[in-house]
Image: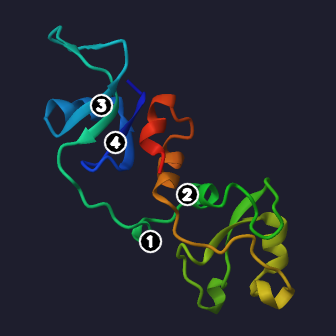
Amino acid sequence: MSQQVLVLNASYEPINVCSMQRAVVLVLKEKAEVLERAARRLRSAAGALLDRPLVIRLRYYIRVPRNEARKISRRAVFARDGYLCQYCGATSQLTLDHVVPRSRGGRSSWDNVVTCCSPCNLSKGSRLPEEIGWSLRRAPRPPRPDVFISVAAPRKPRIWEPYLLA
């Protein structure tokens, strides 16, 4: 039961990805309804047949923290930046860089952390990009909600596409 299930808020906004087991529990507790199901069904220990959910919708609206408040992770920053060094465009040896270095009071926030390759990170050191004549390909910002879905489920089933289109 390791298949992933897309979770939608009551407003049909995608908010998360969960395991098949968690989705079945939410449906059985009547906290969610199945919107898309697989052709094959699940059999319970008692022998009952259950829908195998692919997309579920919560029956009540839950307030999701704004993206600025969500915890920063390497994978989320890489996904937000398209897995590209924000200084040179490299796609290998990726690390994180604080645009305003922590040694100069820079915070670990969505608008100060970018994807950076190791060579650029070493060259930049504790300087500001402007001090060495560099510029960012894209200004750092809080990620869109779909970035967190991409991090949780890098391979998205086709059946999810109508629910992920913004």
Q: Residue at x 34, y 27 (%)?
A: 36
Q: Residue 2 carries which label?
A: none
The residue at which mark 1 appears reads as 68
Q: Which amino acid does label 1 sit on?
A: Glu
Residue tagged 2? 76
Cα–Cα span, label 1 and label 2 = 12 Å
Residue 107 image point, x, y percent: 55, 82
Badge 2 or badge 3: first in the primary sequence: 3
Question: How busy is the neighbourhood of tag 3: few (under 14 within 10 Å), some, or many (20 plus)?
Answer: few
Report whether 124 appears left or right of 64: right
SS class of the residue under badge 3?
A: strand
Residue pointed to by mark 3: 35
- Tell me if 112 is positioned left or right of 16 in this view: right
Is disc 4 in contact with disc 2, using a CB cutoff of under 8 Å?
no
Residue 7, numbered circle: 4
Q: Are marks 2 and 3 in contact (CB under 8 Å)?
A: no
Query: In terms of secondary structure, where does tag 4 sit?
Result: strand
Q: The N terminus lies in which quarter of the figure?
A: top left
Marks 1 and 4, how far apart in space?
Answer: 21 Å
The image position of residue 94, as x and y in percent, is 74, 58
Residue type highlighted by circle 2: Ala
Mark 1 or mark 2, which has the lower sequence index?
1
Residue at position x 42%, y 27% in the image: 2
